[in-house]
């Protein structure tokens, strides 16, 4: 229904249907009744709506929304209302003066939802009101931060308690970073101290403040980010086109779904938008600023939930959130403030009652909610989710989408969702349809999509966009048709024409890393807690070495002792006993550490996107595995040489299966070049020096003085002498130390390589 430009209206839509109806709010009526009963002025025939649910009353030149309706029995509606993400119960009074764009929702616990959107009828869109009024300057010192005692209070988790100072310097001001966690940026460039000039843009957390010389004026909303993409092109293997010249605008604070068939480029587009895998050509603008060259200044403002969970399953829900908060939030955030923020996000995603449970005891849908809660801790302005409803039944799918809708309304975040499930796509504000080959086939309102494609449902749209043998150019034709459509003009061309000139990025594309010592302590504590909570695995790890030692003792005591003084050739030599001990230690150590990194690679990759440093992460693994090896083995020289090869294997492989496949290869080389199976000489002796087991044998044999042990050891048959002096022992230790450094450097290199390759 078309509404006159001067007429206010209410638009009614639901997430269970593509129908959308508009009702004019006539000037001749003082009250407009809304409900399911036929006598209402606006009748909404949905079971979630009560008979008389809402009333709009004209008060002078304003329209006032009232809940519950005065005619509703007992003055209580069944499902209440949702406004800006807050749920008002059925008997809870609510009045609100309507303004253009207000959305009131009515929904039940199962995710079924009706939306009522108010339009004031003005043709010219109103500019969003900034979160804060202009800040007058003039004082010699102006403090900025989260603490209430500051001159300018920015109450946001990304802002430090005492974030920055503005100090008068002649006729202008100088901004000085007060060692904040998320730093200060001027025109996209990180600064510690910088003299300001008019029109400089200062970014503190999610706030962009324009310095005029006499005032600080907020440039854009601190709650969300507008994204503009300009001619994005992405290539795959053999120059295969994955994204084909995509341009679109995602308004700030909107909930957008990216859909399409398998291989259409959904995740590729999302990764190009969030910078995980930047496009080969084209630009991505965040609030008008080039994102790829300024990623560091936006890193704390992004939330990202990949398809695979980014949480440790052997931690409780509250401990998962606690460690994430300590790593991501400013270092001056108190434990009480962390607890308050944890409660907020757990309530937002509906897991507050399960905070004491281990994550592995939760259902798949609940685990996904924990991942979402983790990303909400820092109140990101923009939120990316890759297949969050994958594997969920239709009922849980609807509840998950309703929860994300509520988060978008409450926090004002821009939410971008990749999904193949389209049953509840009407919950979103916009839908982006990709055809095979990364062609943009549609961008606009979800309930207009089926009519645009002339199909009965979204499943038929998938089929209609697939190329066939007779017409392989269907995706290209769909792209060309969309560029000629009214939807393209309204949702792509018009916003692009109103876009301000792009600002060049002047900052860094790499996120600034956090305090390394703090990260090392937190990661070490988290790894120890993970070991403690996995009691069965911990018990197995601790018993491995004692069991092997007991077997060796029994072998020597009862099977070999009777033959020591009678047999001319002993069944086993002292050197072979040490070889067995060394080999078992290498085997156990590699087995313990080979999966340590790759098993949590998704978590590592996400934390690297925020502020995680490679060295704190690597040394936390070395510390925890070193403690474990010390408990497993009584001889330190064995313990230190088994950690690094396993960690290197874990850093170079893509998954646990690959890591397990490489372990036998490493062990075979360790055995062959240990110098025990056969004597090494010439090149073999030199090459054998590259393997830790050889130096382990030298170190242990020299430590115990193997030449003095009467168990059939013949120095003539050995690859090396076991001289019982400090020079030999320290030499072996030094060689092992060099190997630790080399393997550590290789592990760090391969971890860095994973950052570049995104795998």
Image: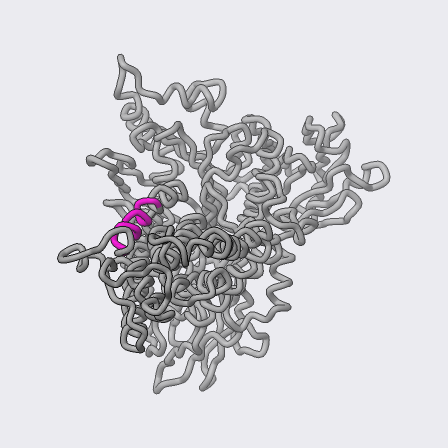
Question: Is 330 or 162 nearer to us in this picture?
Answer: 330
Question: Is 383 or 688 nearer to us in this picture?
Answer: 688
Q: Residue furthest front?
A: 566
What residue lies at 40% left-to-right and 79% top-to-bottom? 176
State the image coordinates of residue 185 (x, y, percent, origin top left).
Answer: 37, 68
State the image coordinates of residue 357 (x, y, percent, origin top left).
Answer: 65, 50
Q: Is the magenta stretch mostly helix, strand or loop?
A: helix
Depicted 449 relative to depicted 583: above or below = above
Residue 373 magenta-highlighted: no
Residue 111 visible, this angle: yes
> Quadrant where the N terminus lies?
top right
Q: Residue furthest right?
A: 74
Residues drawn in magenta: 664-674
* Rendered image quadrant of residue 44: top right
Question: Is 198 or 92 nearer to us in this picture?
Answer: 92
Residue 99 visible, this angle: no
What residue lies at 53% left-to-right and 64% top-to-bottom? 525
Relative horizontal placement of residue 35, taking residue 500 as reference (left or right): right
Depicted 451 relative to depicted 600: above or below = above
State the image coordinates of residue 54 (x, y, percent, origin top left).
Answer: 72, 39
State the image coordinates of residue 12 (x, y, percent, origin top left).
Answer: 60, 33
Number of marks drawn: 0
Q: Tell me which colouring the rendered structure shows.
A: one colour
What residue lies at 37% left-to-right and 64% top-to-bottom? 710
What residue lies at 44% left-to-right and 46% top-to-bottom? 251
Q: Which residue lies furthest to the left in this view?
A: 682
Depicted 737 relative to depicted 431: above or below = below
Question: Is 477 or 372 nearer to us in this picture?
Answer: 372
């Amino acid at each position: 229904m078309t509404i006159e430009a001067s007429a206010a209206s209410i638009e009614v839509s639901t997430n269970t249907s593509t129908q959308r109806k508009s009702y004019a709010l006539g000037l001749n009526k003082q009250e407009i009744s809304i409900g399911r009963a036929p006598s209402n002025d606006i009748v909404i025939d949905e079971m979630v709506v009560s008979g008389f649910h809402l009333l709009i009353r004209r008060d002078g030149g304003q329209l006032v929304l009232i809940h519950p309706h005065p005619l509703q029995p007992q003055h209580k509606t069944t499902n209440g209302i949702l406004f800006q993400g807050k749920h008002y119960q059925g008997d809870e009074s609510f009045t609100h003066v309507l303004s253009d764009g207000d959305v009131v929702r009515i929904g039940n616990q199962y995710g079924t939802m009706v939306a009522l959107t108010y339009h004031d009828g003005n043709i010219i869109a109103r500019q969003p009101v900034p979160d804060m009024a202009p800040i007058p300057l003039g004082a010699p010192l102006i403090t900025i931060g989260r603490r209430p005692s500051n001159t300018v209070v920015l109450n946001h988790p990304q802002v430090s308690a005492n974030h920055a100072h503005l100090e008068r310097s002649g006729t202008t001001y100088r901004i000085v970073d007060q060692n904040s966690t998320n730093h200060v940026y001027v025109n996209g460039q990180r600064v510690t101290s910088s003299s300001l000039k008019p029109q400089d843009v200062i970014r503190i957390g999610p706030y962009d403040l324009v310095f005029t010389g006499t005032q600080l004026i907020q440039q854009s909303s601190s709650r969300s980010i507008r994204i503009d993409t300009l001619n994005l092109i992405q290539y795959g293997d053999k120059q295969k086109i994955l994204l084909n010249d995509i341009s679109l605008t995602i308004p700030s604070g909107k909930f957008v779904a990216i859909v399409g068939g398998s291989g259409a480029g959904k995740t590729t587009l999302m990764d190009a938008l969030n910078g995980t895998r930047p496009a080969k050509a084209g630009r991505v603008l965040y609030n008008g600023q080039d994102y790829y060259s300024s990623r560091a200044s936006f890193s704390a403002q992004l939330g990202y939930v990949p398809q695979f969970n980014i949480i440790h399953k052997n931690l409780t829900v509250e401990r998962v959130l606690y460690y994430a908060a300590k790593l991501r939030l400013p270092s001056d955030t108190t434990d009480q403030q962390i607890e308050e923020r944890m409660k907020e996000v757990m309530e937002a995603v509906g897991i507050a009652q399960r905070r004491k449970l281990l994550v592995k005891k939760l259902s798949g849908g609940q685990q996904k909610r924990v991942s979402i809660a983790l990303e909400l801790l820092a109140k990101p302005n923009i939120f990316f989710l890759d297949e969050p409803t994958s594997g969920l039944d239709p009922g849980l799918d609807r509840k998950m989408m309703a929860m994300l809708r509520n988060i978008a309304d409450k926090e004002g975040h821009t939410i971008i969702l990749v999904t193949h499930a389209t049953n509840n796509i009407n919950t979103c504000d916009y839908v982006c349809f990709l055809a095979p080959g990364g062609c943009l086939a549609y961008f606009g309102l979800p309930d207009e999509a089926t009519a645009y494609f002339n199909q009965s449902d979204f499943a038929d749209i998938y089929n209609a966009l697939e190329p066939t043998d007779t017409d392989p150019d269907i995706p290209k034709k769909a792209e060309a048709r969309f560029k000629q459509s009214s939807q393209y003009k309204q949702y792509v061309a018009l916003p692009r024409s109103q876009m301000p000139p792009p600002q060049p990025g002047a900052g860094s594309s790499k996120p600034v890393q956090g305090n390394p010592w703090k990260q090392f302590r937190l990661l070490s504590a988290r790894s120890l807690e993970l070991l403690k909570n996995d009691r069965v695995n911990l018990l197995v790890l601790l018993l491995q070495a004692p069991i092997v030692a007991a077997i060796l003792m029994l072998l020597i005591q009862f099977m070999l002792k009777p033959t020591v003084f009678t047999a001319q050739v002993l069944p086993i030599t002292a050197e072979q006993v040490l070889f067995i001990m060394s080999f078992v230690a290498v085997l156990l150590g590699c087995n313990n550490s080979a999966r340590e990194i790759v098993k949590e690679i998704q978590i590592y990759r996400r934390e690297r996107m925020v502020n995680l440093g490679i060295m704190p992460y690597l040394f936390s693994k070395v510390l925890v595995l070193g403690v474990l090896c010390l408990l497993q083995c009584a001889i330190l020289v064995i313990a230190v040489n088994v950690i690094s090869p396993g960690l290197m294997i874990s850093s170079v492989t893509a998954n646990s299966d690959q890591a397990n496949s490489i372990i036998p290869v490493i062990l075979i080389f360790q055995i062959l070049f240990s110098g025990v199976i056969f004597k090494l000489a010439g090149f073999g002796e030199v090459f054998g020096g590259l393997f830790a087991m050889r130096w382990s044998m030298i170190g242990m044999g020299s430590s115990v003085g193997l030449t003095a042990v009467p168990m059939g050891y013949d120095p003539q048959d050995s690859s090396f002498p076991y001289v019982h002096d400090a020079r030999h022992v320290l030499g072996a230790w030094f060689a092992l130390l060099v190997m630790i450094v080399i393997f550590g450097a290789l592990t760090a290199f391969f971890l860095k390589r994973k950052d570049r390759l995104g795998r």
